[in-house]
Structure formats: structure tokens, C-alpha cells
Image (spheres, rainbow, N blue to C red):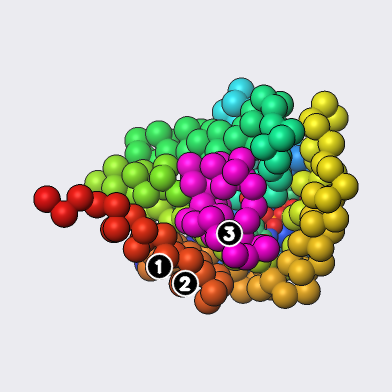
């Protein structure tokens, strides 16, 4: 994409955290922004802030709700014009330990983190292809979608979170190839720790019938939230990296220098497993 001004973007999980930072960075470039989220009060605040900079509208949406997704896509395009940038970012930093695993948590985490991304693609990509005006999709995965690091406290996120984020990486890599002939770029955002309240928010949003965390996991989550807040990259930095990736059509957006070693270790383990003849 040569220029962003005058385009319309749709950003999920955009009422706070990384999503709001991406919305701010796009708004600063003259992009009209449609922000979708579950959280009504946070959406109102986001709309007030973003409207001072650009055309902005906020929409209440659970990204798991396919029917409502389609309705919102129609409303956004009627109010702000054709969407050519989609940021599928809503997600929950949640998982479950193997001893407590159940279908509720699998359906919930995969429902938000993986199906939610697919629902955004399904709602907007066919329209982008039909219009032939090009565009860009950014899907938020995580460094947890690239490797599992058993030595690192922060990169051992639980099998369910890892599974949901690996799914987003695979979907994005393949879509990038399949959408290239339509002039639609695809980037996958794989952040390391970012200073948001994501761990706490995920605890608040957990379904009432989900298995409770053990005392040990609850303590680990408290510690993880503190570390992420204190040591994570600022969301504004990630917002700017996303804009740069859209402009340069970059396939991957990573934020943490310490990801190099575990990525290399995974690639070496895979290469070791390739038969030599
Ligand atoms: N913060 C980090 O360290 C980090 C690292 C790697 C990846 N991520 C990913 O980045 C994304 C954003 O995380 P964040 O840290 O900004 O968290 P956050 O909690 O600050 O923001 C997430 C937003 O998504 C919304 N949301 C949750 N479930 C939703 C649903 N079903 N429908 C619509 N909206 C929903 C929440 O209301 C919230 O406003 C997530 O996909 C997360 O997995 C975060």
C-alpha cells in the first residue's frame, strides 16, 4: 500500500491495549477507523478519543458471533466507506492446565483467538476481492504462535493459547499467498510481552462455567501480569510497527529481540527431523 490516508480500517479488540494503539496509529495517518470490542464503556472512551483525530465509530461485537459480524460489516461500510484494512486483533490471554482441560475452555479460547480471526476474514475479504481495490489484513497471533519455550516463564503460555495462536500464524501465511493475486497483503503480528492489562482482562472475561484456576496458576498469572506491565513493549510501539508492516507489506511483525534464540532452536529441531534422503 503506497498511502493510507482516505482508507477505512476495521480493528477488533480495539477498545484498549494493542488494538487501540493500532487504531491510534492508523488514525494519525488519516485512516477512518471502525473499532469493535465487547466492552461498551471502553468503546465509548475510544470513540471519543479517536473522533478528535479522524472519522471514527465504535461497535459492540463479540468476534465469535458470525451473524452480528456480517451485520456490522454492512453498517461500517455504510457509515465509513469500504473497508480495505482489517486488523483481527481481539484475543484472550488464557489457557487451561492439562489436568483441568475441558471442552468449555477449548471452545472459548479457540472461539475468540482463532475463529474470531477467521470471522473477520470471512466478513471482509470477499468484499475486498470483489472491489479490486486492494487492501491489507493484519492478524494478531503472538510469539506463542511461533514457538514454545520451556525455559522461559513468559513464553510458556499453555497448550490451548499456543494452539490458537499457531492456528492464526498458519492461516495468515497461507492467506498471504492466496490473496497476493488480489492485491491484498497479509501480515501476522507475533508480539512478545506488550504492556497491557491483557492477562487481567482475560481473567475477567473467562466464562462462568470454565474450570477455576488452581492457586498455583492464579499466582503465576499475577506474576505474569506484573512482568508484562513492567517490562513489556509499549502498545504505541506495536501500533507503529503495524502501520509500517501495512505500508511495506511485511509478512511478520515481531516485537521482542529475545525471540531469536527459541525461533532458531525450533527451526533447528525441525531441520534435524527432515530425512536426509
Ligand atoms: N499483551 C501481550 O503481551 C500480548 C502478547 C502477544 C499477543 N497478544 C495478543 O494481542 C491481542 C490484544 O491483546 P492485549 O494485550 O491488547 O489485550 P487487552 O485485554 O488489553 O485487549 C484485548 C481486547 O479484546 C477484547 N475482546 C476480548 N474478547 C473479545 C471478543 N470475544 N470479542 C470482541 N472483543 C474481545 C477485550 O475486551 C479487550 O478490549 C490478543 O489477541 C492477544 O492474544 C498480546
Q: Provide residue 240's location: percent of width, then percent of height.
A: 56, 71
Which residue is the site of mark 3? Answer: 150
Callout in the foreground (3, 2): 3
Which residue is the site of mark 1? Answer: 264
The Cα atoms of the two marked residues, 1 and 2, are separated by 5 Å
The residue shown at (47%, 33%) is: 122
> Who comes first in sequence, dot 1 or dot 3?
3
| Foreground pick, 89 / 2 | 89
Q: Please indicate, yes or no, whether residue 12 appears anywhere in the rendered image.
A: no
Tell me if residue 202 comes above or below residue 7 in the rendering.
Answer: above
Q: Provide residue 18's location: percent of width, then percent of height.
A: 66, 60
Q: Secondary structure at mark 1?
A: helix
Tell me if residue 133 comes above or below residue 16 in the rendering.
Answer: above
Marks 1/2 in contact by CB < 8 Å: the verdict is yes
Identify the magenta region. 140-168
Q: Secondary structure at mark 2?
A: helix
Which residue is the site of mark 2? Answer: 261
The Cα atoms of the two marked residues, 1 and 3, are separated by 14 Å
Q: Quadrant of the N terminus?
A: bottom left
Q: Provide residue 201's location: percent of width, then percent of height.
A: 80, 50
Amino acid at each position: 500500500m503506497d498511502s493510507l490516508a482516505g482508507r477505512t480500517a476495521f480493528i477488533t479488540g480495539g477498545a484498549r491495549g494493542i488494538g487501540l494503539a493500532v487504531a491510534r496509529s492508523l488514525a494519525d495517518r488519516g485512516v477512518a477507523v471502525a473499532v469493535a470490542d465487547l466492552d461498551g464503556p471502553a468503546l465509548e472512551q475510544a470513540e471519543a478519543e479517536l473522533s478528535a483525530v479522524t472519522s471514527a465509530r465504535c461497535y459492540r461485537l463479540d468476534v465469535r458471533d458470525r451473524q452480528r459480524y456480517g451485520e456490522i460489516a454492512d453498517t461500517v461500510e455504510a457509515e465509513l466507506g469500504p473497508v480495505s484494512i482489517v486488523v483481527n486483533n481481539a484475543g484472550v490471554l488464557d489457557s487451561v492446565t492439562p489436568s483441568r482441560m475441558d471442552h468449555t475452555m477449548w471452545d472459548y479460547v479457540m472461539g475468540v483467538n482463532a475463529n474470531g480471526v477467521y470471522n473477520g476474514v470471512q466478513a471482509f475479504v470477499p468484499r475486498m476481492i470483489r472491489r479490486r481495490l486492494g487492501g491489507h489484513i493484519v492478524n494478531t497471533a503472538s510469539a506463542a504462535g511461533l514457538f514454545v519455550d520451556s525455559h522461559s516463564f513468559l513464553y510458556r503460555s499453555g497448550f490451548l493459547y499456543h494452539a490458537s495462536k499457531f492456528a492464526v500464524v498458519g492461516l495468515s501465511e497461507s492467506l498471504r499467498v492466496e490473496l497476493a493475486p488480489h492485491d491484498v497483503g497479509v501480515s501476522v503480528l507475533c508480539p512478545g510481552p506488550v504492556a497491557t492489562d491483557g492477562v487481567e482482562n482475560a481473567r475477567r472475561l473467562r466464562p462462568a462455567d470454565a474450570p477455576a484456576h488452581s492457586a498455583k496458576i492464579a499466582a503465576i498469572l499475577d506474576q505474569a501480569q506484573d512482568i508484562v506491565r513492567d517490562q513489556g513493549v509499549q502498545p504505541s510501539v506495536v501500533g507503529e510497527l503495524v502501520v509500517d508492516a501495512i505500508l511495506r507489506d511485511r509478512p511478520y511483525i515481531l516485537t521482542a529481540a529475545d525471540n531469536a534464540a527459541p525461533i532458531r532452536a525450533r527451526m533447528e529441531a525441525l531441520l534435524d527431523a527432515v530425512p536426509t534422503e
